Amino acid sequence: MDPVAGTTPKITKSEQEWREQLSPAEYAVLRQAATEPPWSGEYVDTKKVGVYECRACGAELFRSETKFESHCGWPSFYDPACSDAVILREDRSHGMVRTEVLCASCHSHLGHVFEGEGFPTPTDQRYCINSIALRLVPTE
Ligand SMILES: [Zn+2]
């Protein structure tokens, strides 16, 4: 994974350590920026109340209150739990210009953010996040 300009992750592990900690599917998404197939993830339709943590490092990333139904096949949030929970960077892979979303604590890949799509949310942003990059910790 490319270093993120100007920032140092709080949690640094070698790729070998990440491979040992994560399952192959988790590693492919979190450390190699793969995308899980739409509708395949365990949190696509989840409405449980709780906190979504980074599956790699456990940092709090999103809260269930900002999860909304985008019908895109991936869990969608309109805002991160706090503004420095995630890092955004331009992603020009696959012939598209997108904005990649990374965990600010460990720089693992989470998904992409899109905006201006007209969803009736406070931010008009859609953080389109791979389920496998998250772990829901229910609070009720
Ligand atoms: Zn992380």
Image (cartoon, rainbow, N blue to C red):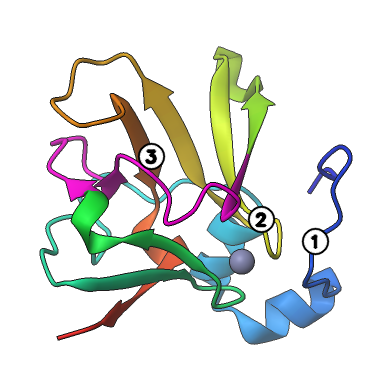
Decide which of 52, 34 is in the foreground and name it.
52
Percent of width and height locating residue 74:
27, 46
Q: CA distance from mark 2 to mark 1?
A: 7 Å
Decide which of 103, 71 is in the foreground and name it.
103
Residue 37 vertical placement versus 15 (above, below): above
Q: What is the magenta range? A: 67-87
Q: Are marks 2 and 1 in contact (CB under 8 Å)?
A: yes
Percent of width and height locating residue 75:
27, 50
Q: Which residue is mark 3?
A: 127
* Residue 96 location, quadrant: top right
**Horizontal side, residue 72 vs residue 135: left or right:** left
Quadrant holding ligand 1?
bottom right
* Mark earlier in primary sequence (1, 3): 1
Does mark 2 have its CB less than 8 Å from ligand 1? yes
Task: Count up the numbered dots.
Answer: 3
Q: Which residue is mark 2?
A: 104
At a point 57% along the width and 15% down the height, the residue shown is 97
Which residue type carries mark 3?
Answer: Tyr
At a point 42% along the width and 56% down the height, the residue shown is 81
* Residue 57 location, quadrant: bottom right
* Mark earlier in primary sequence (2, 1): 1
Residue 25 vertical placement versus 138 (above, below): above
76 in magenta: yes
Percent of width and height locating residue 110:
51, 51
133 in magenta: no
Which residue type carries mark 2?
Answer: Ala
**Horizontal side, residue 77 vs residue 70: left or right:** right
* Mark earlier in primary sequence (2, 3): 2
Does mark 3 have its CB less than 8 Å from ligand 1? no
Q: Which residue is mark 1?
A: 9
Residue 11 vertical placement versus 76 (above, below): below
